[in-house]
Amino acid sequence: MRLTTRSEYGLICLKYLCEHTDRVPISLGEITENEKLPKDYVEQIFLRLRRASIIQSHKGVRGGFALSRPASQISIKEVFEALEGNSIFEAFCREEMREKIVCEHYRECSIRPIWTRLSELINDFCSKITLDVLLKNEKAVITHLDYLSQHWAQQIQDENRPAKSETTVSNVRPKPIYMDYHATTPLDPRVLEVMLPCYTDVFGNAASTSHVFGWEAQKLVDKGREQIAHIVGASSKEVIITSGATESINTALKGVFEMYREKGNHIITQVTEHKAVLDACRYLERKGAEVTYLPVDEYGLIRISDLENAITEKTILISIMYANNEIGTIQPITKIGQIAKRREILFHVDGAQAVGKIPVNVEEMGIDLLSYTAHKMYGPKGVGALYVRKKNPRVRLSALMHGGGHEQGFRSGTLNVAGIVAFGKACEIAEQEMGSEGLRLSQLRDSLKEKLQKELDEVYLNGHATERLPGNLNLSFGYLEGEALLMGIGDTVAVSSGSACTSGSVETSHVLRALNSRPDLMVSAIRFGIGRFNTAEEVERVAERVIQVVRKLREMSPLYKAAKEGKK
């Protein structure tokens, strides 16, 4: 990506001021002479920066210029807006298209949506990068900006590429809008920023205690572990680093069963758990465990009375997910924790979908073991955590992996320093922004739901209306098949179906089956997972496309026509 000359010169001058803060103010002549810049042009740049209160001038014999605030309080976005105006999009569009002025027809341009999205991404990224960060991590910042511009520039080329023949249906389109945030999340640029140096600068093995490379790595690991623990109200000594939530869940369930099997062999879970829990429980059943699978009501909630009735003197573990990955229903974790404490039973929670999105506190909720992961909260894939309570009670586990005694003997293997650092940063960001982000996502979710139900009939909500994740919207569309709808809207939005294809046959979701939904509604369920980087404009576009495709498919459905005629 190329900056305008004004922005490029402006950043060079600000960098010079940052690097020489020990002897400010600095004269304009010194900067232009040392950086080989035209003095008249820089004077105009400094005038704009002064008006934006980014720099200040000092008069007198030793006069010159200095930053008006610490570099940590000045964002790149603020600099660009001071130099180019409020629209970074217009400035970049003008420069990239090599035109002297913005095209007067750019608002009607077919590639404008791509430019607009690029502008949103660059604006968001630049607002989070301050001058001090740019100086310390210039390569990382430039790399990410280059990635954004190159990725979207390719889509612009594809959009403008002429059809190969008259039979070509359409040109290559931009990628669809991503609304599958329950499956995984994109890496937050702020997370990437702290992660990249771990591959080049601080690359040591955290277990290498004999030299500075290992010490530096261990220091970063300690900080990351503190952040990973803090978001759930735990001590860093209670956090075991794993490769993800699936490993954490297996370590918790199998580790408890092996360690406490002399006390009892009974485990309680529920039918809508993630496959990581259900498959681990079935494995333990083959090893002699007795497992009770609690039913759920029509909203996906367990009944507390069913849990209490299921407990026996042999019960050693209760494992209930905090929030469901398909329908977003949130279980009454605090009530379950109170029961577990009163009956002296260990309580494990699969928090993969909850941590970072809604408040989780292991002390207040009575949780003894908690599994969570980075890639569900804008961190990297391949790193997760297992909280293991140290006292009241002290939880003991049998290790699944051996070979070095890492992670207090629970999980041997070289630590993923970059992953831990990134996971920690993702937790820090989520903890700071959870309240405002949750409110925004709830509003986008409700807006999408209202638009669809206003324009379409036979649209049903799966899961609880209020006790659900902020960004989760799982809907069933009567008289349709989910796969047909997915194919129809696939050019606009990436979402998930409530059914899974296995060996050519369609198997309905075990979660929707547990809700006792109508068979036709099970196969027509679509999960919209709205996340941090979705916008109101995208919600509008998705709603329009879904409405269009549903109407078209129903026009071809004899079942829908018969149902409508039967109601007349």
Image (spheres, rainbow, N blue to C red):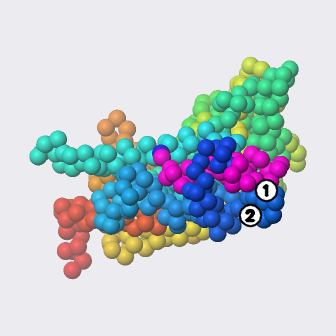
| Type of the residue with mark 2 | Ser
**Image check: 152 left or right of 378?**
left
* Callout 2 crowding tier (Cα within 10 Å): few <14, some 14–19, many ≥20: some
The spot of residue 99 in percent (x, y) is: 36, 55
Q: Left or right: where does residue 38 sit relative to residue 64?
A: left
Q: How far across and how far down the image is residue 471, in percent? A: 54, 61
Residue 260's place in the image compared with 36, above or below, is: above
Above or below residue 187? Residue 262 is above
Q: Secondary structure at mark 2?
A: strand
| Span shown in magenta | 2-30
Distance, label 1 to label 2, CA atoms, is: 8 Å
Residue at the bottom extreme, as displayed:
568
- Residue placed most toward the observer, 471 or 94: 94
Question: Relative to residue 371, is residue 100 drawn left or right?
Answer: left
| Residue 539 image position (x, y, % from top left) | 43, 65
Tell me, for residue 25, which label it has, or none: 1
Q: Nearer the viewer, residue 149 or 264?
A: 149
Q: Residue at x 31, y 37 (%)?
A: 504
Determine whether label 1 and label 2 are within 8 Å by CB: yes
Among all residues in the image, which is located at the extreme right? 391
Membership of 16 in magenta stretch: yes
Q: Considering depth in this image, is 30 or 404 the residue closer to the camera?
A: 30
Q: Which residue is mark 2?
A: 57
> Residue reaching furthest left?
166
Q: Residues within 10 Å of mark 1 (few under 14, many from 20)?
A: some
Q: What residue is drawn where x is 80% and y is 31%?
A: 216
Q: Is residue 295 above or below residue 245?
A: below
The secondary element bearing badge 1 is classed as loop
Magenta span dominant secondary structure = helix
The kind of residue tagged 1 is Pro
| Quarter of the C terminus within the rendering | bottom left
